[in-house]
Image (cartoon, rainbow, N blue to C red):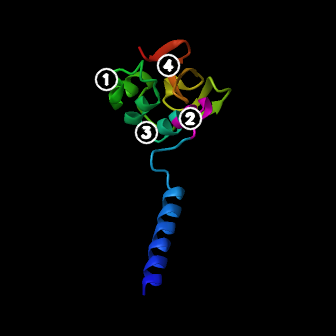
Amino acid sequence: MKMSYVRLVVGISLLTVIALASCDLFGSDEPVSRSERRDTFLSQLKAGQYDRLNGNMHPDVREAAMNTANYWTEELGAGGGWEFQVISTTQVEITAGPVASVGQTFNFTYGLRGDDYYFTKISRNGDDIAPR
């Protein structure tokens, strides 16, 4: 009886250790690269998730207004259908989207916070979008 109890405790402890080792309890340990930050921004833009775009900005340059979809639709134009041609980590050509944007280029400037890259500036054809 005592041996069964010990085996049960050891078995449960072992399963707990395995379960915790396979979980990511505190978020990803992998740093966010420049290309990952760019791709996240572009996928959110394509999905019309304007209210999430501010999360790509470096905390030192974030403005309260950037938390709203209105900020981004004013800066980028309303409408969907965004498509892009990636030129480099810092440049992306807009190949489809709001009519005024087609053929223009996004330029991204990055800064580090910890190990993660964020945008410190986004411009389109030389005009600053974020921050203004």
How far apart are the alpha carbons under marks 3 and 1? 19 Å
Q: Which label was assigned to residue 129?
A: none
Q: Secondary structure at mark 3?
A: loop
Which residue occupies 40% across, 35% down? 52
How far apart are the alpha carbons under marks 4 and 1? 15 Å
Q: Secondary structure at mark 4?
A: strand
- Mark 4 or mark 3: whose residue is earlier in sequence: 3
Mark 1 or 2, closer to the camera: 2
Task: Identify the residue position indicated by label 3 in the image.
Answer: 48
How far apart are the alpha carbons under marks 2 and 4? 14 Å
Q: Secondary structure at mark 1?
A: helix
Residue type pointed to by label 4 = Thr
Q: Which label was assigned to residue 120?
A: 4
Task: Identify the residue position indicated by label 2 in the image.
Answer: 32
Labelled pair 4, 3 in contact (Cβ < 8 Å): no
* Relative image position of residue 10 (x, y in whole percent): 49, 72
Which residue occupies 60% across, 24% down? 103
Count up the numbered dots. Answer: 4
In the drawing, does residue 90 fall left or right of residue 60?
right
Q: Residues within 10 Å of mark 1 (few under 14, many from 20)?
A: few
Task: Identify the residue position indicated by label 1 in the image.
Answer: 64
Residue 103 appears anywhere in the view = yes
Mark 2 or 3, closer to the camera: 2
Q: Which residues are magenta?
A: 30-40
Q: Main secondary structure of the magenta part?
A: helix
How far apart are the alpha carbons under marks 2 and 3? 22 Å
* Relative image position of residue 122 (x, y in whole percent): 51, 20
How far apart are the alpha carbons under marks 4 and 3? 22 Å
- Mark 4 or mark 1: whose residue is earlier in sequence: 1
How far apart are the alpha carbons under marks 1 and 2? 23 Å
**Placement of the C terminus among the 4 image quadrants:** top left
* Relative image position of residue 121 (x, y in whole percent): 50, 18
